[in-house]
Every structure is written in structure tokens, then in C-alpha cells.
Amino acid sequence: MKIFKKLVFILAVSAASLMAVHAEAGDKNDEKGADKGIVFVPGSWAQILKKAKAENKIIFFDAYTTWCGPCKMLQKNVFTRPDVADVFNKNFINVKVDMEKGEGPMLAERYPLEGYPTLFFIDGDGHVVKEIIGYQNPETLIKVGKAVAKKNGALL
């Protein structure tokens, strides 16, 4: 019986060790995976406009809400794709704003919304260059992003 208890103890310790190693490896993979998606820049709207103007870039502005299903799908299935991130991280200042919190309500007045998500392309002076409403598949979002970047003289 003592051998059985020791064996169970050894198996339990081994399993716990393996789970800890697996969890640590998963954390590292998550960190590596984070750089594969669109990088959204934090900051106030005034700071974002200033940054866009200084870098001569267009702002890609994801106007979303936490309860919006298509918004969640964009975040999960489109913004995380390396091919989408490649276009958007090189050519735009990327910003996400919950339109019901913080500066969101003020921005909703400045940039009226017809639905969620609304994806704006805005110049450094705060003028809308392009607006698209609703979920966009990766291919369409890349096509729109490249067209906006090209029109505004960005290097793809």
C-alpha cells in the first residue's frame, strides 16, 4: 500500500510539473503571438491626432462596443491575422475606442455612427478619409487599407 501511495504522489507531482511547464510555454507563445496582430496605440484622441500628423500617417480607428458581436469577430478573426497586421501596422496609426466609455461618446458626436463596428480612416487633421460599417473579412480589409494608404501616399 505504501508503494501505491508513493506512486500516486510521484504521478501527481509529475503532472503538476508538466502542467506548470506547459502553462509557462503557453504564456511565451501568447507573447510571441501578440506581435502578429494589429498593434493598437493607446492615448487620448488629441495625442493620436498629433502622432498621425507628426508621422504623416492616416489613423485607422475601430469604433466598437463591448456588446457588439461583429466587433468581437473582427478582433478575434481579422485583427489578429499577420497579413492584416502587416498592412495596418506599417501604414496607419491604429486605434480602438469603446464608443460607450472614456472619449467614446465625444468621438461618436464628432464622427457619427450608423452601426457597429464602424471603421474610420482619419487624417492628422481629424477629417474622415474613408468609413466602412460592419464586419469585414480579412481580404476586404486589406484591400481597403491598401487603397487608403496608396491614395494618401503611404508606402506599402
Image (tube, grey):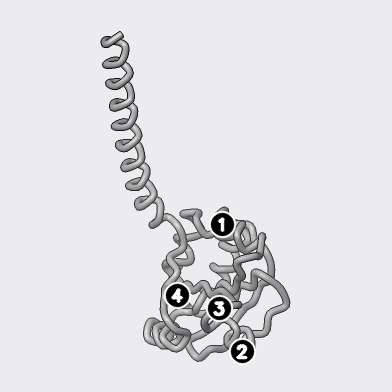
Label 2 element class: helix
Label 3 element class: loop
* Residue 101 badge: 3
Taking depth in this image into account, of 35 and 155 the one nearest to the observer is 35
- Indicate left or right for 10 with 45 as reference: left
Amino acid type at image mark 3: Lys
The local crowd at label 1, few if under 14, some if 14 to 19, many if 20 or more residues have their Cα within 10 Å, is many
Label 4 or label 3, whichever comes before in sequence order? 4
Q: Residue at x 59, y 63 (%)?
A: 141
The residue to which callout 2 is attached is 110
The local crowd at label 3, few if under 14, some if 14 to 19, many if 20 or more residues have their Cα within 10 Å, is few
Task: Tell which tag, 2 or 1, sits nearer the viewer.
Answer: 2
Label 3 or label 2, whichever comes before in sequence order? 3
Q: Residue at x 53, y 89 (%)?
A: 126
Determine the CA span between mark 1 and mark 3: 23 Å
Label 1 or label 4, whichever comes before in sequence order? 1
Q: Residue at x 27, y 16 (%)?
A: 6
Label 1 or label 3, whichever comes before in sequence order? 1
The residue to which callout 1 is attached is 78
The residue to which callout 4 is attached is 93
Determine the CA span between mark 2 and mark 1: 26 Å
Label 1 element class: helix
Amino acid type at image mark 4: Ile
